[in-house]
Amino acid sequence: MTRDRAVLVLEDGSRFEGDAWGARGETLGEVVFSTGMTGYQETLTDPSYAGQIVVMTAPHIGNTGMNDEDSESRRIWVDGFVVRDPARRPSNFRSTRSLDDDLVADGIVSISGVDTRAITLILREAGVMRGGIFSGASVDLDPQELLTRVRTAPDMKGKNLSDQVSVKELRVVPSVGASIGRLVVIDLGVKESTLHHLAARGFDVHVLPSSATYDEVKTLNPVALFYSNGPGDPSASDHHVSLLRSALGDRMPFFGICFGNQLLGRALGFDTYKLKYGHRGINQPVVDRITGKVEITAQNHGFAVDAPRDGIVESPAGFGKVQVSHVSLNDDVVEGISALDIPAFSVQYHPEAAAGPHDSTYLFDRFRDLVEAELSSSQKGGR
């Protein structure tokens, strides 16, 4: 059988010729690799991957097909997809269609039949870089022209992508069981699993667009504020930092994950920076520096918080004492922050990971307990 040709071009000049897969055409983005052996549907529909071309290190992708229950958002968000061996047909009792069907439906230009190990080694040594997948008419263009298109594509640094992936109007997810109260979630690229976990802890979850103001948050009279995961550079999200500082100043309990962790870091007065490689996949080891417990976590981030890792320090923005609560065991990157004088904490990884691991789901319980303690203190006149 004759297959359509495709080529992946990296900005260092590397070229990988393979088979066109998914939609045909041209796509440009930041090329990253994910180490997850399962959960590709979660990865593809995670809004945090917007702007990125994802290379899967696991060789066989698509075996379990796609279904309507496991998607984390309304569509596939990756800008391109790279695999070695796509499944010829899905084989799973929950599958309703093939992965290729969804890639085509959402217009995701992809490539298969390439050596993903070689691509991963390049990214592991040189760091993530811009790239492009070309198929259809563009595959026959001059190689130098394709490389020029890749090298002139926008870099991820400085990009604000939250508005692209966020809801456009209020969405409500009712609590499961007795309600603690309203929780405002600022949708920076939130996953469905996150909303389900929060609702299961008794929150009436009110999801607001990324453009929401603090006045709009207060109008809902929430018991707490939550910042979700999301794509882009945290240094380009001054609006969300300002909103969060207002909430922290009012002692509104706060929990943030992934992008939300970076924004809490900024709100507390710390800087953020771009990682050379980033952390992606479902096997990232993190240590809780307070308990000494090691968690295997799911992650997807290319930026991190630059905060002192040892001891307790003063928040440069005046919010009292702060400590780094979690760090990566691979490279000592900050993976969690706890404010000690106000009710706020965050983690860089994904405790809601539907495909696993589930070591970190207790963090949603910790958040509920924090909110209940703050409500009790307020009722006793402690606030």
Image: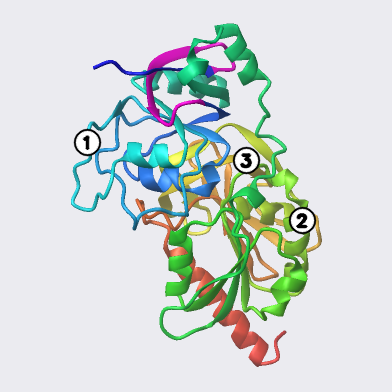
Give x and y (percent) for residue 278.
55, 35
Instruction: Say whether residue 12 is magenta.
Output: yes
Q: Secondary structure at mark 2?
A: helix
Q: Which residue is mark 3?
A: 303
Asked which secondary structure carries label 3, the reply is: strand
Q: Which residue is mark 2?
A: 239
Number of the front mark, 1 or 3: 1
- Give me the C-alpha separation between circle 1 and circle 3: 37 Å
Residue at the bottom extreme, as displayed:
380
Q: Is residue 284 visible?
A: no
Q: Is residue 220 above or below residue 317?
A: below
Identified by mark 1, the residue type is Arg
Task: Report the quarter where the C terminus lies.
Answer: bottom right
Marks 3 and 2, how far apart at CA: 18 Å
Residue 133 in the image, given as x and y percentages of width and height: 50, 23
Locate residue 330 relative to residue 38 in the image: left or right: right
The amino acid pointed to by label 2 is His
Question: Which mark, by number, is residue 89?
Answer: 1
